[in-house]
Image: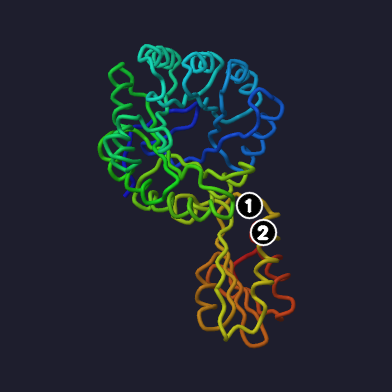
């Protein structure tokens, strides 16, 4: 069962409560370069990003938010460190949410100014705690970065904001270490009511980071924890959005796009299934399907027909032939050499709503 949290609005996107888990990413353009930043955000919007975060290293970047906002459709989060004046300028420029770590702002009065400005504008504050920025006294207490220390830092910073009569809060605590990250969330989740933004920070390159993110984010989502996610990968943030969608689909929290099921093959398989599935997968990627479609491609007659029948549309190979199934019924039997072409055509017809049950 999913953890129940307070619902918070980031622009017109709900986070927490009964809202679906949302996908976030972060631009890696120079925020001061408005055209480059808007161009990247639009690509991410098209891919399915629902909330975008931009780094705000100086006043020029904070002021650029106003122009960026006019050219995008999704809510924008300003990422602030150390300087409260950047947060104030970003809020006044129209940011839909502010991400700060109160622990790295030395003056409590500066935090109070941010809170008051956010309250006036009706926008949430995301309290972000990372394993690389724990307070010195917490590090001394635990001797190193620990799950207990991360949770304690988050609770301390939450109390700081709550003491300022503000509860429009989202919380994130992240580590590049999967189990430490998981344990910290398990400690924190029941100790506060706010929505949690989850991810594995600094997960690495696309190839390495996808594995860590799938395990780390997937484990939390499977435990009912997480209201919004970011997959942190080095490189093009488009990969973050696409892979976040795959993770949400894999844990059953999003039914969108094509879910392709294919068998690992064994000695009974008489076709080059890898080549066939790869060609089908590439063709499906070009279709840019929004609705959910369960597609199965199976290599032999043992489990193939059964698995294929459970899919919206399936292809199962046998002795010298292949069978295409739709919704549990045989659609047609085709020659092996024509199977992938016939199957792709059947998928397109299904998507167009022209295939009828036999």
Give SS at disc 2. Answer: helix
Q: How many badges with numbers are in the image?
A: 2
x, y percent for residue 4:
31, 40
Q: Position of residue 156 (x, y in %)?
A: 29, 28
The front one of 146 and 356 is 146
Residue 120 versus residue 201 in the image, above or below: above
Name the residue that disc number 1 marks. Answer: 289
Q: Which residue is mark 2?
A: 284
- What element does badge 1 sit on? loop
Can you say which quadrant of the picture contains the C terminus? bottom right
Q: Please indicate whether residue 340 sits to the left or right of residue 226 in the image.
A: right
Task: Tell me, yes or no, whether the two marked residues, 1 and 2, touch with CB atoms within 8 Å.
Answer: yes
- Where is residue 356, by image quadrant? bottom right
Q: Disc 1 versus disc 2: distance between alpha carbons?
A: 8 Å
Nearer to me, 161 or 275:
161
Residue at image location 68% in from the left, 69% down from the top? 343
User: 262 left or right of 14?
Assistant: right
């Amino acid at each position: 069962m999913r953890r129940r949290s307070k619902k918070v609005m980031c622009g017109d996107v709900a986070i927490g409560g009964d809202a679906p888990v949302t996908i976030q990413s972060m631009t890696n353009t120079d925020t001061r370069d408005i055209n480059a930043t808007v161009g990247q955000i639009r690509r991410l919007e098209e891919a399915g990003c629902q909330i975008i975060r931009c780094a705000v290293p100086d006043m020029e970047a904070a002021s650029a938010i106003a122009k960026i906002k006019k050219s995008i459709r999704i809510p924008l989060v300003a990422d602030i460190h150390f300087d409260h004046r950047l947060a104030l300028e970003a809020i006044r420029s129209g940011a839909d949410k502010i991400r700060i770590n109160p622990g790295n702002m030395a003056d409590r009065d500066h935090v109070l100014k941010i809170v008051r400005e956010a309250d006036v504008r009706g926008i949430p504050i995301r309290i972000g705690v990372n394993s690389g920025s724990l307070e010195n006294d917490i590090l001394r207490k635990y001797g190193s970065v620990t799950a207990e220390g991360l949770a304690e830092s988050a609770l301390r910073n939450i109390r700081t904001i709550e003491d300022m009569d503000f509860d429009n809060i989202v919380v994130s605590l992240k580590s590049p270490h999967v189990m430490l990250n998981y344990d910290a969330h398990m400690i924190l989740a029941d100790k506060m009511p706010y929505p949690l933004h989850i991810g594995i920070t600094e997960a690495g390159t696309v190839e390495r980071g996808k594995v860590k993110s799938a395990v780390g984010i997937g484990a939390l989502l499977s435990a009912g924890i997480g209201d919004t996610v970011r997959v942190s990968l080095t490189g093009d943030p488009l990969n973050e959005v696409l892979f976040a969608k795959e993770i949400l689909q894999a844990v059953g929290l999003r039914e969108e796009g094509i879910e392709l099921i294919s068998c690992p093959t064994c000695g009974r398989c008489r076709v080059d299934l890898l080549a066939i599935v790869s060609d089908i997968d590439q063709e499906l990627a070009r279709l840019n399907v929004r609705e959910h479609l369960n597609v199965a491609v199976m290599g032999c007659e043992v489990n193939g027909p059964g698995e294929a029948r459970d899919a919206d549309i399936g292809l199962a190979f046998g002795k010298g032939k292949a069978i295409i199934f739709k919704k549990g019924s045989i659609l047609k039997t085709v020659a092996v050499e024509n199977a992938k072409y016939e199957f792709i055509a059947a998928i397109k017809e299904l998507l167009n709503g022209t295939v009828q049950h036999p």
